[in-house]
Image: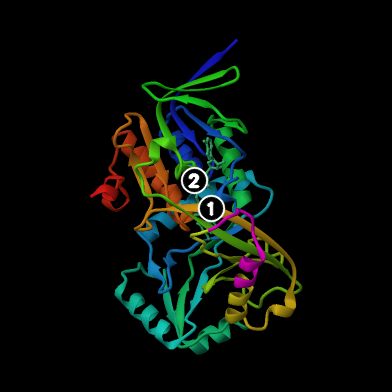
Amino acid sequence: MTETAQFDILIFGAGIAGLSTAYAANMAGLKTAVIDQNNPGSGASGTPIALVNPATGRKAKKTWNAEVCLTYTKQLLEKIAIFSENRFFIENGVIRPALDKKLAEGMYNTFIQSTWSEGWVEWLAEEEIIARFPGLKCINGGVWVPKALTVSMNEFILALYQYLKTRGVVFFLNRRFQTDSGVPFIASCDSIKIEADIVIHCIGKEMVDHPDWKLLPLHPVKGQTLKLKLSECLQFKSSVSSLGYIAQSPNNDRTIVLGSTYEHQFDHLQPDTNGEKYLMNRLHKTLPDIYDYCQERTGWAGVRVTVPDKKPVVGKHPEIDNLYTLTALGSKGLILGPFLGKLLIDFITDQGRIPDIFSIERLFG
Ligand SMILES: Cc1cc2nc3c(=O)[nH]c(=O)nc-3n(C[C@H](O)[C@H](O)[C@H](O)COP(=O)(O)OP(=O)(O)OC[C@H]3O[C@@H](n4cnc5c(N)ncnc54)[C@H](O)[C@@H]3O)c2cc1C
C-alpha cells in the first residue's frame, strides 16, 4: 500500500545548502522534508576540515556581508554543538601571510580599502607574524582574521542532521525518487509518495546535468584535499590561508588538512598523486620545515559547482512554478550557505528578497 506524506517544502540534497535551507524552513514553521540519494554530507560538503573565512581570494577580500554571515553560521554551530560527541568547530582565527612583496602590497591596499567592523581583521607586520606563528613563511606582512572558524565538516553535517530530525524535519536517505513536476510536486519511491507545494534543489554537482537546470551556466570544479597526521603539533593554533589553506583540527589532535586544488578539467573523481604533490609543494612554500613531521596522508576529493561570476545562485526557477534552488556556493559553503538558506526561505514566504548579485536573473542579463 502506498502512503502519501505531505509537506510545505521538499528539499533535494543534504549538503550544506540543503541542510541550511531545511534549518531555515523549520525555523519558519514550515513542514519540511529532505531527500538525499546518499547520506548527508556525501557530496562536496564532505570535505574533511573547512574554514569559515570572511577574507578570501589571493588578496584577502572581504566576502559579502561577512560579519552578518559569519555570525549567523557561528550561532548555528553553537546551537547544534550538543548533537556531537566531539568538538567540531573552533574560533582559532586565520592568518593570511603574504609570500611576496607584490602580494603584500595588494593585500594591504585591499585591507585599507575595506570597511570591516572593529576587531574583525588586523594588518600584522612581517616580524609580528613570524613571532606569533613560528615556522610560517611571510614577506612584508599579512592579514590576521581572529574571528574565522575551522570546522570538521562530517561532524558538523551529522550534528545538523540530528538536530533537524529532533525538530521534526523528515529525511528520506539512500534512495532515488521518481519525480513529477507540477503543483503539488510529487516524488515517489517504492511505497512512499511525497507531495509538496515547494521544491528546492540543492543537489550540488548533479545540478550541472539536471534537465530542469540546463539553463544555468553551471560548471563543475573538482577539488582535492590532503589530511596529514603530524608527529608534533604546529607551534600555533590558528589555521592558515596563503597558497590554499592549512586547516588545523578543532580537536587539537595533530591533524591538519591541506586544501585545495581547483581542477576545471578532470577525468576521474578520486584524489590522485598529482593533486597530493601540488598540495605538499604549497605546504612546503608556506611552512618550509614541516615535511619531517608529516606521518599518515589521506586524500579526499569532491566537486563543487560554480557559475562564471563565481557567486552563489539563489531563487526561483524562471519557468517552473514551484521550483527553487540554492547552489554554486563554490568554496564558501560554510560562510554563505546558512545565511543564504535563510534568505531563500524568507523570499519564499514573502518575508524578504534575494540580493541582485545572487539572483538567478543576473545570469541571463
Ligand atoms: C576540496 C573542497 C574544499 C572545500 N573547502 C571548503 C572550505 O574551506 N570552506 C567551506 O565553507 N566550504 C568548503 N568546501 C565546500 C564547498 O563550500 C561546497 O560549495 C559546498 O559543500 C556545496 O554544498 P552543496 O550542499 O551545494 O552541495 P553538496 O555538498 O555536493 O550536496 C549535494 C547533495 O545532493 C545529493 N544529491 C545529488 N543529486 C541528488 C538527487 N537527484 N536526489 C537527491 N539527492 C541528490 C548528494 O548526494 C549530496 O549529498 C569545500 C569543498 C571541496 C570540494
**Would you say 358 lies left or right of 248 here?**
left
* Foreground pick, 197 / 276: 276
- Magenta span has 272? yes
State the image coordinates of residue 247 (x, y, percent, origin top left): 59, 66
Q: Secondary structure at mark 2?
A: helix
Instruction: Name the residue carrying label 1.
Output: 303
State the image coordinates of residue 119 (x, y, percent, origin top left): 41, 70
Q: Is residue 252 above or below residue 86?
A: below
Q: Residue at x 58, y 76 (%)?
A: 282
Tell me the amino acid under the disc marked 1: Val
Q: Residue at x 49, y 83 (%)?
A: 99
Disc 2: residue Cβ within 8 A of ligand 1's nearest atom: yes
- Magenta span has 338? no
Figure coloring: rainbow
Give, as a single range, the part of the protein colored magenta.
266-278
Instruction: Name the residue carrying label 2.
Output: 204
- Give how far apart the Cα atoms at labels 1 and 2 are: 8 Å
Disc 1: residue Cβ within 8 A of ligand 1's nearest atom: yes
